[in-house]
Amino acid sequence: MPPSLRDRIKPLANLSRVDEVELALLKLLASNDLKPGDPLPKEVELAEAFGVSRTVVREALTRLRAIGLVESVKRKGSVITHPDVLTPLERMLHPQILDEDTLRDIFEIRLVLEVGMADFLFARMTPAQLEELENIVAEEKEGSSAVFDQEFEVRFHGKLYEISGNRTLQRFQSLLLPVFGYVHRSGMLEQPGPADAPFVTHHELVEILRSGSPERFREGMRIHLENHFRRVL
C-alpha cells in the first residue's frame, strides 16, 4: 500500500464491539416475527440492552442501513425495510478494482444466465416484446452479431432479461455487461480461433423465440456465445 494512502487511514475505534452489535442485530431480525415497517428499539434502549455506548449502536445501525436492512423514518427512528440485495454490488462492482479471478467468474456468470433463461422467456414473452426485439435486430449493424458490441449487447440482451420478468435479474444484467465488456477488451482471456460450429445470430435467436422452443433457444444461445465459452473452458 502506498505510504501516502496508508498515512491517511485512521485507526478504527471500537471495531470489535460494533461487529458484535451488528451481528446481534442481524440475529434479532432473523429470529423474530418482524416485517418491513416495524420499528427497532431506540438507540439508547439498544445501548442499555447490549451494554455498549450509543456510538457503537449508531455505527452498527449505519452498517445495516448501508445494506438496506433498516432505514431512518422521521418520528419513528430506525425501522425494518425490504433489503436491496444488489445495492452493495452496485457500489463495488467496478472492473478496475476487481482482481482477475473475480472478473473471470463474473464473465462466466453472464454466460450461464443467458443460456439458462430460456424457459422464463417462452413463458412470459408477449407479442409486443417480441416485436421490440425484432426492431432492435433490424437496427443492428451488419456483421456486429459476431463480435462484442457493448452498446448493442445492452439493448438486445437487456431486452431478454426484461422479458424474463425477473427485476432482480434485469438489474444484475446491467452490472454484469460492463464487466463482461471490460474483460473482453482487456486481453485477460485469450481470443479463440474460428469455431467449427455455425454461428447463431441475434436475428436467428429472435426467430427461435417466435416459432421454436426453450430447448432450441438454449442450444441456439449456447452456440451464439460459443466463442466466449471457448475462452474460459
Image: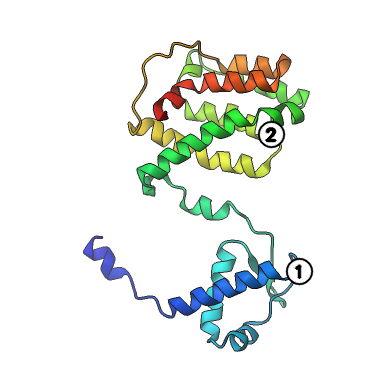
30 relative to 126 in the view: left or right: left
Residue 8 horizontal/vertical position (percent):
30, 69
Is residue 166 placed above or below 128 in the rendered structure?
A: below
Name the N-terminal-most of marks 2 and 1.
Answer: 1
Which part of the image, by quadrant, shows the C terminus? top left
Which part of the image, by quadrant, shows the N terminus? bottom left
109 relative to 46 in the view: left or right: left
Which color scheme did the rendering employ for the protein? Answer: rainbow
Give the image quarter of residue 168: top right
Residue 134 horizontal/vertical position (percent):
66, 18
Residue 120 horizontal/vertical position (percent):
70, 32
Q: Residue at x 48, y 30 (%)?
A: 150
Which amino acid, by three-letter code, is at mark 2? Answer: Ser
Q: Secondary structure at mark 1?
A: loop
Neighbours of disc 2 within 10 Å: few (<14), some (14-19), many (20+): many
Q: Residue at x 38, y 49 (%)?
A: 97
Q: Examine the rendering and report whether any part of residue 138 can be seen.
A: no
Give the image quarter of residue 38: bottom right
Q: Residue at x 59, y 75 (%)?
A: 24
165 relative to 15 in the view: left or right: right
Disc 2 to disc 1, C-alpha distance: 32 Å
Which amino acid, by three-letter code, is at mark 1? Answer: Asp
Q: Secondary structure at mark 2?
A: loop
Task: In the rendered structure, find residue 164 and report the number of the disc placed on it.
Answer: 2
220 relative to 4 in the view: left or right: right
Q: Nearer the viewer, mark 2 or mark 1?
A: 1
Name the residue beneath numbered marker 1. Answer: 33
Q: Are marks 2 and 1 in contact (CB under 8 Å)?
A: no
Q: Residue at x 47, y 40 (%)?
A: 106
Residue 4 horizontal/vertical position (percent):
24, 65
